């Protein structure tokens, strides 16, 4: 089989979405007979950019409009002032961004990367693309349109030298990996030591440093009659050499529910081989590293996101494996560009899982070797640390995710469901993730902290740290909850600190008539204005993304305009200036 | 005593009068200097070494066509080293070598007709922004980027090579010079490195970032806009969706109760028929319920206005019609044992 010129696809990914799209594009381009390299921005040896002529970057945007964590080394290099303007003059490139227009810095990471590549002489292969999570079409629609443009531009600009044609869609590409259940070995009881198995991982596959913990406490913080279960998860490090700052995150590596995994194994007829030791030949990347006691069952249990919503790329591979003609046609229909709307109603809107799709398409039997390509990796989940810096203890504040859709079965977050199973004494591994927020608060000026719901987590860490290290500074907290007696997270701690004159607290209880955080902010406009404008304080806003952050922003702008007799526009610019100098920090998820 | 170096291109040797004229001219303007002459290729190939800190002027005499032959970074570095501080490189300046020259430490004159080795005693005049970071470093630290090539430098004259090869040579030369930036990035000792302000990247209008964006095509098969409520929906679509879901759940409830009833009937029949195997049947079936075609049809007909005539209701959501009462329930295969277990606890 002949190949065209090599193409490199780099992704910058926080949660793995960009990574999935990168692999999706690579599969598409393999059908076009390109030779491909796919890896994260930081994994790629940047020198090799000089050897290639075509580069594609797919990148999401992290909290403050930054480059995602797995692209920071790359970005540091790119920002060097002394790079010449013809450094990438030999490169054709294109980029696709994954963003959410409700964030003020919508898609800014990919925009910056794109702009910098242009500055350094790279030429655009074709129009760039940006996917908007908020758009009615969904990210997939933007991606598909961009993918089409990329493919047609590549065909035109890097044509096949001989009379080769693209691989027909009906042909199945060779799998990238070979999965071998070792039949001569003895059976391992995968279900027996799930928690212990999860802590023993191969380190050579991963860059993050794993830390071993023991669970000290897993306590419900909200009252039993409250609709939501919010957990305090207290962990003790085994080595006691932790180093973290307020705002830093802990990355947890969840496992699937054993019952779901067993259902999949039975469905696919893998029962006999599921507990045999498994050998995987070929490249396979897993965040946190592959577990050591690998069987087919433990591979699925710890590494495959069978409860995730299938993307279009899932269907474009899956239809090959359905033997029933009607099922095959339907799966293929979902994979076509014009099946997007149908697919949305089928999968995204009711939040249907891959497992549920497989249960429904009963003729779909996955060849073992294609399993890693078909089902995305189970990704680590990041949680803001809510305890003050400590060498051995870490506390997390985790809201358990459960909701209903049209599908009868309850929807649960994979990770929070796993968190619920943790008991005191259980071992877990995780890794610390620097978030570079704390440096903005390393001064003695006031801080106004706004943290509805579990947004309180990083704020709690900052408050406790500030009381220790900067006891004279003014701390002003705006928590937001539903009821003062049901879900007021850490309410007792705040009251105590207020009595000791360490903290000013202005809670909002939405179901008790005191409105939302933005209402309470406005009621205290004199104070806010004094702390921020007169005393040059900082603002930290944490919590869920979406409506809340933008409403808080508007409220703050209104306060500044009113109190200082500024025009609307002036107040707006003032807030942007605060943001640029790190005095307005938003950490939302 | 300061000297002058006349570098000559091999083809110029065939025009001795031109060489002599240039020599006269150079000596006339620098009466007290010694003049040395070398063929550029010999220097480039390392066959002729140049003494360091020797020349106040290096003049390159070459036909105009040779302008396109780039100097290697190795050659440029040699020239730089052989000049005294403040010394100049003049004559035919090869095209597209400014980058390498700057990297070697040269300052390029505004008219681009000469390269100057900076005076060591005073700060480098900032001719090019790329150099600015070196301003306050000592002259010996001025070349941290330069790396001597392990292999001999390639020919400067590529006139005899065919175009493809010359492209390749150009490419690899270019690559060598660019590689320096990457190698440097790996050593973690670059304290003095300065960075551009990344926020400026979003502001530069000349990049035309927002204009060249791919937009998704509208769905051509249905022609309708996709209906998805935004995360922060305020227009009422979210409520409408939730209402639809509630309605669907109540439809599901009525179906499930019907199913439960027919399942009970079925169970009674099974018990009657299989009394002998009662225990086994219990164990085997457990919470499983068996549907016959008749049951399915019956269940189907329980919904007002629905005939179930599409025959797809049992197949699962992917095949069910819009508004099918079974939407959200698992697929049923008539005659097969269906597990309600997978969603049992939530019913």
Image (spheres, rainbow, N blue to C red):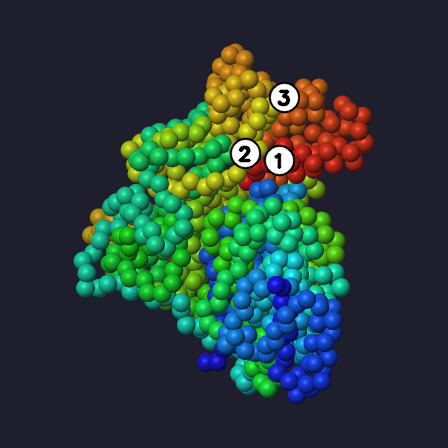
Is B287 situated left or right of A54 in this image? left
- Labels 2 & 1 near each other (Cβ < 8 A): yes
- Seen at 70% across and 37% down, the residue is A576
Residue B339 shows in this picture: no
**Which residue position is annotated with label 1?**
A582
**Which residue position is annotated with label 2?**
A439
Q: Nearer the viewer, residue B189 or B321?
A: B189
What is the C-alpha distance between the residues marked 2 and 1? 9 Å
Disc 1 is placed on an element classified as: loop
Q: Nearer the viewer, residue A150 or A378?
A: A150
- Seen at 64% across and 46% down, the residue is B197
Question: Do marks 2 and 1 share a chain?
Answer: yes
* Farthest-out residue, top: A499
**Which residue position is annotated with label 3?**
A514
Question: Do marks 3 and 1 share a chain?
Answer: yes
- Numbered badge on residue A503: none
């Amino acid at each position: 089989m002949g190949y065209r010129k090599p193409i490199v696809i780099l992704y910058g990914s926080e949660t793995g979405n960009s990574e999935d799209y990168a692999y999706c594009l690579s599969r598409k381009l393999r059908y076009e007979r390109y030779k491909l390299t796919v890896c994260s921005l930081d994994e790629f040896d940047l020198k090799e950019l000089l050897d290639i002529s075509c580069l594609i970057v797919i990148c999401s945007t992290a909290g403050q409009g930054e480059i995602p964590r797995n692209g920071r080394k790359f970005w540091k290099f790119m920002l060097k002032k002394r790079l010449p303007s013809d450094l990438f003059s030999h490169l054709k490139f294109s980029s696709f961004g994954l963003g959410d227009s409700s964030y003020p810095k919508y898609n800014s990471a990919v925009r910056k990367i794109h702009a910098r590549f242009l500055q350094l002489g790279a030429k655009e292969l074709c129009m760039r693309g940006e996917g908007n999570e908020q758009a009615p079409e969904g990210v997939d629609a933007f991606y598909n349109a961009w993918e089409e443009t990329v493919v047609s531009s590549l065909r035109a600009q890097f044509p096949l030298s001989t009379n080769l044609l693209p691989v027909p869609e009906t042909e199945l590409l060779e799998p990238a990996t070979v999965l071998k259940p070792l039949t001569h070995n003895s059976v391992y009881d995968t279900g027996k030591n799930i928690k212990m198995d999860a802590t023993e991982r191969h380190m050579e596959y991963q860059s993050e440093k794993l830390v071993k913990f023991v669970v000290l406490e897993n306590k419900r913080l909200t009252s039993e009659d409250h609709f939501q279960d919010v957990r305090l998860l207290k962990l003790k490090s085994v080595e006691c050499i932790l180093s973290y700052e307020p705002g830093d995150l802990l990355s947890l590596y969840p496992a699937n529910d054993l019952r779901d995994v067993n259902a999949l194994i039975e469905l696919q007829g893998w029962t006999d081989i599921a507990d045999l030791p498994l050998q995987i030949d070929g490249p396979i990347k897993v965040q946190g590293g592959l577990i050591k006691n690998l069987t087919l069952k433990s591979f699925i249990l710890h590494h495959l996101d069978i409860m995730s919503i299938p993307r279009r790329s899932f269907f474009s591979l899956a239809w090959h494996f359905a033997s029933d003609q009607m099922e095959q046609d339907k799966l293929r229909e979902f994979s076509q560009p014009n099946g997007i709307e149908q697919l949305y109603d089928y999968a995204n809107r009711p939040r249907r899982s891959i497992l549920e799709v497989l249960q429904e398409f009963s003729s779909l039997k996955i060849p073992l070797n294609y399993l890693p390509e078909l089902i995305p990796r189970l990704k680590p989940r990041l949680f803001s640390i809510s305890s003050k810096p400590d060498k051995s203890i870490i506390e997390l504040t985790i809201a358990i995710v459960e909701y209903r859709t049209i599908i009868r079965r309850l929807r649960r977050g994979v990770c929070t469901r796993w968190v619920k199973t943790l008991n005191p004494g259980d071992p877990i591994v995780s890794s610390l993730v620097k978030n570079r927020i704390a440096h903005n608060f390393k001064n003695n000026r006031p801080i106004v902290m706004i943290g509805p719901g579990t947004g309180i987590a990083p704020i709690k860490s900052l408050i406790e740290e500030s009381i220790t290290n900067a006891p004279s500074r003014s701390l002003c907290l705006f928590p937001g909850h539903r009821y003062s007696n049901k879900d007021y997270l850490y309410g007792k701690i705040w009251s105590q600190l207020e009595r000791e004159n360490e903290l000013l607290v202005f809670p909002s209880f939405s179901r008790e008539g005191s409105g939302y955080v933005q209402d309470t902010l406005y009621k205290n406009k004199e104070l806010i204005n004094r702390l921020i404008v007169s005393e040059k304080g900082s603002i930290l806003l944490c919590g869920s993304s979406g409506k809340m952050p933008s409403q808080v922003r508007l409220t703050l702008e209104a306060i500044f305009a009113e109190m200082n007799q500024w025009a609307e526009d002036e107040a707006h610019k003032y807030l942007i200036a605060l943001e640029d100098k790190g005095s307005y920090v938003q950490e939302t998820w | 005593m300061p000297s002058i170096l006349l570098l000559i291109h091999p083809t110029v040797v065939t025009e001795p009068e031109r060489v002599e004229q240039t020599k006269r001219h150079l000596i006339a303007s620098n009466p007290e200097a010694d003049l040395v002459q070398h063929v550029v290729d010999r220097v480039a190939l390392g066959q002729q070494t140049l003494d360091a800190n020797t020349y106040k002027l290096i003049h390159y005499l070459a036909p105009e066509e040779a302008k396109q032959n780039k100097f290697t970074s190795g050659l440029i570095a040699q020239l730089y080293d052989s000049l005294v501080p403040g010394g100049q490189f003049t004559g035919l300046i090869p095209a597209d070598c400014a980058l390498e020259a700057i990297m070697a430490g040269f300052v390029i004159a505004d008219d681009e007709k000469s390269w100057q080795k900076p005076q060591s005693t005073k700060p480098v005049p900032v001719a090019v922004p790329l150099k600015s970071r070196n301003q306050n470093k000592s002259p010996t630290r001025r070349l941290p980027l330069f790396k001597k090539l392990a292999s001999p430098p390639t020919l400067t004259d590529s006139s005899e090579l065919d175009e493809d090869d010359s492209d390749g040579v150009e490419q690899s030369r270019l690559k060598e010079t660019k590689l320096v930036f990457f190698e440097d990035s790996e050593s973690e000792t670059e304290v003095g490195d300065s960075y551009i302000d990344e926020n400026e990247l979003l502001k530069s209008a000349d990049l035309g970032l927002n204009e060249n964006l791919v937009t998704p095509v509208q769905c051509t098969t249905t022609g309708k806009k996709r209906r998805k409520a935004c995360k922060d929906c305020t227009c009422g679509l979210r409520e409408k969706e939730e209402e639809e879901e509630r309605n669907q759940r109540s439809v599901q409830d009525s179906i499930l109760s019907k199913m439960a009833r027919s399942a009970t009937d079925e169970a009674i029949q099974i018990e009657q028929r299989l009394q002998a195997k009662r225990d086994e049947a219990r164990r085997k079936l457990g919470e499983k319920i068996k549907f016959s075609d008749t049951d399915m049809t019956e269940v189907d007909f329980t919904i007002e206005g629905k005939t179930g005539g599409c025959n797809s209701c049992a197949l699962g959501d992917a095949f069910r019609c819009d508004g099918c009462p079974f939407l959200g329930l698992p697929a049923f295969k008539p005659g097969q044992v269906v597990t309600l277990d997978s969603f049992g606890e939530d019913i």
